[in-house]
Amino acid sequence: AIVLNFVAYSVTSTILVWILLDWRPRRAFSTESARNLWGFSTRIFSATVLSEGTQSLDKVLVGRFLGAAALGPYSLAYSTMLLPSTLLGGALFSAVSPAYSRIQSDKARLERAWLRSKRVSIAVVSPALLALIVVAPDFVHVVFGERWDDAIIPLQLLCVGGLAHSLVTLHWGVLQARGEAGTLLRVTLMSSVVTWAAFAAGLHWGIVGVSAFYAGAKWLLVGPSTWMTTKAVSFDVWAALRAGVDLVPAAVGAAATGLVVRRLVLETALPEALRLILVSSAMFAAYGAIVLAVAPSLVRDIKQVARRRADDGTVHKPA
């Protein structure tokens, strides 16, 4: 059924393209175009393989050296940590990537769009990850059950790493739009090697160690990754590092609100599910109020990205 679904989708989309577009393929071959396309596509493919491999290597190492009993909680924590980046950051990536491609020849305009997108990405992903850090005990118990207690601390540590990853997620899109596949491959290779080393180094301390070293590696990579990306596309590295940083205090303030509320309700007999809802609501309400007060223009930027997302259904793969 899965294979047939994929085949049906491919056939249907191809037929619709032929019906709706006037363009038809011709018997023409350009050696120069083939050479350029081959070089670009092989680098993108290699970067994708490295990225996918890195996302799987930690599970392989944990399963091989720490056993199945450790792999279960770790996989649960890692998958949960990815939710904000996948649902929120992934939607943003798929919305802005086509826009990057359309304005790739206008460097100044592309830089402004990229910096604005980075700011939006940090604004939507960071509060979700910080919220997970605060409510992790209640979230794991309510959603998965108390038998998954071992996943709580790894989840919190992995979310710290996820915060760093949200700062560099859109590097892939701008490098691809500017045709800098070589730099994209080098950045991905550097990130992969450092992350692999972190996974291996953390094994000695179990899944908590793996998670902690992962978080440290991700923060260590923010600077070099940003520098390599901005250098390749001739953007201002300091502007890239500052993009969205002004919103971090708002997210931290919301998380602090959540910690205070959670500490207060812990002293009551409130069920965990209600406590989870109450604390999460308090955090997001606080974050929304702070953002509206200090960065009202951000709301407009988020609405613009949402409209692009609604107009474009293409799915892209972030680094």
Image: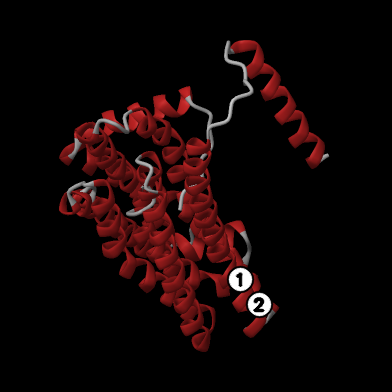
Between 90 and 41, the one lying in front of the other is 41
Between 163 and 175, the one lying in front of the other is 175
Residue 205 relative to residue 65: left or right: left
Which residue is found at the position 32% from the left and 54% from the top? 167
What is the C-alpha distance between the residues marked 1 and 2?
6 Å
- Which amino acid does the dot numbered 2 rest on? Gly
The x, y position of residue 87, in whole percent, is 50, 44
Q: Is residue 262 above or below residue 178?
A: below
**Mark 2 neighbour class, 10 Å CA radius: few under 14, some 14 to 19, many 20 or more:** some
Residue at numbered disc 1: 59
The x, y position of residue 143, in whole percent, is 60, 56
The answer to whether any part of residue 171 appears in the image is yes
Query: Splitting the image into 4 quarters, where does residue 260 fall?
Result: bottom left
Dot 2 falls on a residue whose secondary structure is helix
Between 182 and 13, the one lying in front of the other is 182
- Which amino acid does the dot numbered 1 rest on? Lys
Residue 230 relative to residue 150: left or right: left
Query: Splitting the image into 4 quarters, where does residue 220 fall?
Result: bottom left
Residue 73 relative to residue 230: left or right: right
Q: Residue furthest bottom?
A: 204
Query: Splitting the image into 4 quarters, where does residue 26 fall?
Result: top right
Between 194 and 90, the one lying in front of the other is 194
The answer to whether any part of residue 265 appears in the image is no
Residue at numbered disc 2: 63
**Mark 1 neighbour class, 10 Å CA radius: few under 14, some 14 to 19, many 20 or more:** some
Confirm or deny contact between disc 1 and disc 2 (CB under 8 A). yes
Which residue is found at the position 38% from the left and 60% from the top? 187
Dot 1 falls on a residue whose secondary structure is helix
